Amino acid sequence: MPSSAHCPGCERFIGPVSECPYCGAEPGGRMPLRILRWSALVFGVGGLLFLLVAVQRTELPLVQAADIVPAMNYGRVRVLGTVVGEPRVFDKQGAPDYASFELDDGTGRIVVAAGRRTARGLVSGRLLPVRGDRVEATGSLNLAPDRRARLYLDSPSQLRRLGGTQPPTKEAS
């Protein structure tokens, strides 16, 4: 009983090959494996591009400090609140190495922190907020059991001032 896995000439089992290795006959009536391979590649890359576009157009969820739970550790979120206290900048060899400030959203407080490159960008671009500023911060949550939740900024563009005290202009300084 010949099937698509058997040669139509010698009726031996040949599997998915496009030419019989025994008699050289070409099995007809089936899609070449090459077409399946290329279509799988095209659909795979197309699916990844679709996911990339969908993720870039999706806005991160706005969370409140009181709603943060351990399951959100390392998650990317947005927090909206008012800066309480002055920001702290730690210098290393004359350049900002770390910056942090506390944000109160009305339900609790969260520490917003920036590492070396981001801290330098915030300080040099005069983007570091001061007490009373209303800001929106986007970043990765870090929930350590021994301290308050922290939101780490990956770039200065993840911090937006929405109102409050304005930074001093270059003419005023």
Image (spheres, helix red, strand yellow):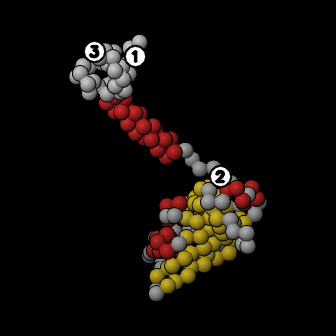
The amino acid at mark 1 is Ser
Instruction: Estimate the spatial distance between the alpha carbons at disc 1 and disc 3, rounded to whole Å.
Output: 12 Å
Residue 137 visible in the picture: no
Question: Tag 3, which secondary structure?
Answer: loop
**Does residue 15 sit above or below 131 in this rendering?**
above
Q: In terms of image quadrants, where is residue 90?
A: bottom right
Residue ranking furthest to the left: 24
Residue ranking furthest to the bottom: 93
Q: Earlier in the sequence, mark 1 or mark 3?
A: 1
The residue where tag 3 is placed is: 9
Q: Earlier in the sequence, mark 2 or mark 3?
A: 3
How many marks overall?
Answer: 3
The residue where tag 2 is placed is: 62
**Does residue 4 sit above or below 156 in this rendering?**
above
User: Which residue is found at the position 36% from the left and 27% from the top?
Assistant: 16
The residue where tag 1 is placed is: 3
Question: Tag 1, which secondary structure?
Answer: loop
Horizontal side of residue 13 vs 84, given as left or right: left
Name the mark nearer the viewer: 1 or 3. Answer: 3
User: Which residue is found at the position 58% from the left and 66% from the top?
Assistant: 152
Question: Tag 2, which secondary structure?
Answer: loop
Instruction: Estimate the spatial distance between the alpha carbons at disc 1 and disc 2, rounded to whole Å.
Output: 59 Å
Instruction: Estimate the spatial distance between the alpha carbons at disc 2 and disc 3, rounded to whole Å.
Output: 67 Å
